[in-house]
Image (tube, helix red, strand yellow):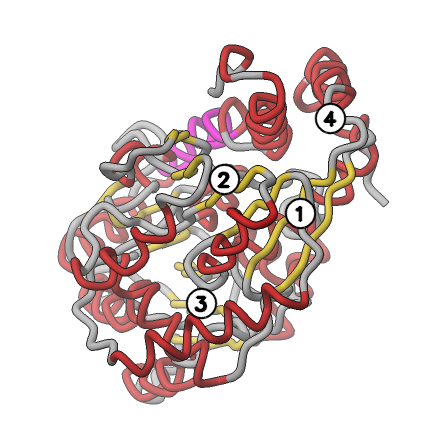
């Protein structure tokens, strides 16, 4: 098991001491995280890494997953898309079903001293706040800068009941009568997905999937989701390939709370149209080493999102000093300084242009990757993330004046 002190060579021992000191102020308090899935997606991944580290420094951090069936997650997928600004049609019956599932879960749960609710799926649990008291925090991991108005109005009734709301980027904040806090997510540099890999291990994964490492490889790793624009990635690849030799890898999986994934993956396969240089790979949740190897062995990493909460695949690739081309949406511009630590694009044509440019100019591509790694080291590692959360938790018990979030 990774220990918190193992991060000292990366972030410094003073950072580790600071986390331990903050944790002492939470002795005897239960921090309960609640989300919608234990595997798949960035939220589950962050909690999987963070909960054990919090426990090591004496924080009683717990994690519960809201229970729901396919009907419930079909509704919450609509909420997810609606927060991203996608027009959706949610019926009165679907709103009622959402509330019923939340209320059933609330009756079965034992709530902690701080109830830390992630994203829309469990948001209705806050109806218990008045009866139980406690401190309630809602964490939005989604780009909510331009939400569907009807869905936001429904969710807003619950958000206002929380003590605080956390957003990943300044643009996502809303007009709310409660405290709003900016805390960006993070990556774990020691996790299997991000730790250094021997060259032989990278080559083994590429050989396993039949990808030729002697030729340029452009890779996007993300859920098969319309908002990740995998079809647009294929179009950009086809445009760029008229001028440069390359292969394209589209790799990802799904999450138990996302029923659209298999449908979109089939559409991606159809769009690939038997092109032997396009590799559409389904990766199960246990594929961290494969993802690590695919990113490290790629010439360029893409994240051509149309909307994005934060886009930690960008941080993962930059940490590996890879040149990244990504959509200028959500939290991605916080991670990339255009033309300095990566490339931001706004269209299929722009993505194709920069693919061609970076393949033809490997020295510039290398410089982008080096600058990107340094930016991630300074801003988006898990130790900074833990510090921000600890400061928030302490402030709920000891007053807002102790909080100085980065």
Read off the residue under disc 2: 185
Dot 2 crowding, Cα within 10 Å, few <14, some 14–19, many 20+: many
Which residue has dot 4 on it?
A: 26
Mark 3 and 2 residues: CB-CB less than 8 Å, in contact?
Answer: no
Q: Position of residue 329 (x, y in %)?
A: 25, 46
Residue extent of the magenta highlight: 363-376
Relative to residue 206, is residue 140 drawn left or right? Answer: left
The x, y position of residue 210, in whole percent, is 56, 76
Q: CA distance from mark 4 to mark 1?
A: 13 Å
- Residue found farthest to the front: 131
Q: Element at badge 3?
A: loop
On screen, residue 226 above or below 1: below
Foreground residue, 40 or 295? 40
Image position, residue 148 (x, y; %):
18, 60
15 or 10: which is nearer to us? 15
Q: Earlier in the sequence, mark 4 or mark 2?
A: 4
Residue beneath the point at 20% across and 73% down: 88
- Distance, label 4 to label 2, CA atoms, is 22 Å
Horizontal side of 328 relative to 97 (left or right) equals left
The reply to whether residue 364 is in sight is no
Numbered badge on residue 223: 3
Structural crowding at the residue carrying mark 1, measured as other residues with C-alpha within 10 Å and reported as few (<14), some (14–19) or many (≥20): many
Q: Is residue 104 visible?
A: yes
Q: Nearer the viewer, mark 4 or mark 2?
A: 4
Q: Residues within 10 Å of mark 4 (few under 14, many from 20)?
A: some
Does label 4 or label 1 sit earlier along the sequence?
Answer: 4
Image quarter (top left, top right, bottom left or bottom right) of the N terminus:
top right
Residue bearing mark 1: 32
372 magenta-colored = yes
Label 1: which secondary element: strand
């Amino acid at each position: 098991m990774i220990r918190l002190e193992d991060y000292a060579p990366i972030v410094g021992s003073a950072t580790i001491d600071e986390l331990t000191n903050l944790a002492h102020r939470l002795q005897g308090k239960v921090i309960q995280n609640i989300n919608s899935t234990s595997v798949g997606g960035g939220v589950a991944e962050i909690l999987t890494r963070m909960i054990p580290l919090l426990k090591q420094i004496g924080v009683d951090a717990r994690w519960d997953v809201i229970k729901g069936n396919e009907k419930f997650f079909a509704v919450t997928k609509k909420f997810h898309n609606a927060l991203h600004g996608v027009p959706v049609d949610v019926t009165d019956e679907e709103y009622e079903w959402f509330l019923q599932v939340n209320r059933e879960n609330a009756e079965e749960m034992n709530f902690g001293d701080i109830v830390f609710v992630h994203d829309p799926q469990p948001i209705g649990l806050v109806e218990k706040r008045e009866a139980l008291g406690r401190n309630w925090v809602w964490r939005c991991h989604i780009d909510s800068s331009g939400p569907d108005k009807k869905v936001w109005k429904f969710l807003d009734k619950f958000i206002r009941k929380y003590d605080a709301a956390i957003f990943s980027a300044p643009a996502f904040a809303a007009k709310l009568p409660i405290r709003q806090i900016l805390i960006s997510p993070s990556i774990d540099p020691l996790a299997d997905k991000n730790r250094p890999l021997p060259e032989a291990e990278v080559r083994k994964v590429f050989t396993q999937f039949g990808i030729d490492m002697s030729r340029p490889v452009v890779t996007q790793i993300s859920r098969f989701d319309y908002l990740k624009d995998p079809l647009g990635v294929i179009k950009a690849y086809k445009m760029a390939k008229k001028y440069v030799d390359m292969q394209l890898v589209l790799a990802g999986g799904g999450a138990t709370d996302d029923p659209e994934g298999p449908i979109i993956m089939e559409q991606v396969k159809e769009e690939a149209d038997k092109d032997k240089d396009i590799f559409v790979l389904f990766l199960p949740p246990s594929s961290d080493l494969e993802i690590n190897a695919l990113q490290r062995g790629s010439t360029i990493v893409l994240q051509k999102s149309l909307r994005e909460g934060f886009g930690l695949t960008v941080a993962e690739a930059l940490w590996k000093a890879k040149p990244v081309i990504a959509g200028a949406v959500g939290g991605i511009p916080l991670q990339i300084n255009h033309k300095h630590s990566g490339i931001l694009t706004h269209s299929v044509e722009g993505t194709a242009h920069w693919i061609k440019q970076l393949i033809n100019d490997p020295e510039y591509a290398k410089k982008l990757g080096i600058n990107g790694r340094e930016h991630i080291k300074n801003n988006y590692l898990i130790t900074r993330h833990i510090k921000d959360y600890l400061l928030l938790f302490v402030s709920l018990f000891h007053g807002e004046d102790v909080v100085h979030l980065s």
